[in-house]
Image (cartoon, rainbow, N blue to C red):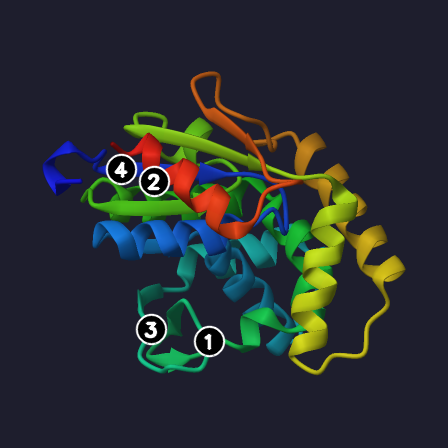
Amino acid sequence: MTRKSSPSIIAIDGPAASGKSTIGLKLAEALGYLFFDTGVMYRAVTWIALDHDIDVRDEAKVTALAEETPIDVTPASKSDGRACDVLVAGKDITWETRLPIVDANVSIVSAYPGVRAALSKQQRRIGQRGRVVMVGRDIGTVVLPEADLKIYLDASPEERARRRHAEMTARGANVKYEDILAKVIERDRIDSTRDVAPLRAAVDAVIIDSDKMSVNEVFEKALALCK
């Protein structure tokens, strides 16, 4: 496949733990594109709020934090499993954004209209440069509705919880599958019912149900869409 035949802006949306980041990263590497998981920005704001003892339910303070905080996302500088570097004022907070306490609070932060507006501007600016695979929940519908290719990657809550459990266990976390499933279901409820940019597939998105597909099978199907 030649690069000139590939879509320049690729948007991948879908619910939590559907495999968006895994497929997006593989696709970006295959195409030589920038991989940008927009969720890291919401995670960064969530972690900063918690680190500064700001109540994540204080919408005004969290929104102000998002508007005033410069967040940079760059190619991975270390081979420690990260897909990218997340930098705030030059400080690497990549792994801090993956802490369980961030998992438990990020949906609250990402539901605030002001936070989404502030971060969407940064996301859109990066995306419009082209040669990018952007992953999130509202990329094809809100951030980059003009994307050349839109993919909606889906999977059942049970399968997504199984994957997340395996991932966290591999990192040494002592977690129960049932607890993760409950969090996945609650995350879906929050993401799909919020007033601003609710989780949904764009009308022109290609929907891929990955329940019974391996990572490589999903990747190959996504890559074929780029041809």
The answer to whether 198 appears left or right of 11 in the picture is right
Label 4, label 3: how many angstroms apart (C-alpha)? Answer: 20 Å
In front: label 1 or label 3: 1
Which quarter of the picture shows residue 129?
A: top left
Residue that label 1 marks: 81
Q: Mark 2 sits on what residue?
A: 223
Neighbourhood count class around disc 2 (C-alpha, 10 Å): few under 14, some 14–19, many 20 upward: some
What x and y, as percent, mark residue 136?
49, 45
Inspect the image, locate mark 1, and give the three-letter code of the amino acid beneath it: Gly
Q: Nearer the viewer, mark 1 or mark 2?
A: 2
- Label 3 or label 2, whichever comes before in sequence order: 3
How far apart are the alpha carbons under marks 1 and 2? 23 Å
Amino acid type at image mark 3? Ala
Q: Which mark is residue 76?
A: 3
Q: Report helix, strand or loop for mark 4.
A: strand
Rendered residue at 30%/52% (across/down): 28
Helix, strand or loop status at disc 2:
helix
Amino acid type assigned to the residue bearing label 2 in the image: Leu
- Quarter of the rendering occupied by the C terminus: top left
Q: Quadrant of the N terminus?
A: top left
State which quadrant residue 212 falls in.
Answer: top right
CA gap between label 3 and label 2 equals 22 Å
Q: Nearer the viewer, residue 63 or 141?
A: 141
Residue 170 in picture, x, y percent from top left: 66, 76
Q: CA distance from mark 1 to mark 4?
A: 25 Å
Please state the horizontal and vertical placement of residue 121, each as a whole percent of the image.
35, 44
Marker disc for residue 9: 4
Asked if residue 107 is positioned above or below residue 46 in the image, the reply reads above
Mark 1 or mark 2: name the one nearer the start of the chain: 1
Residue 210 in which image quadrant: top right
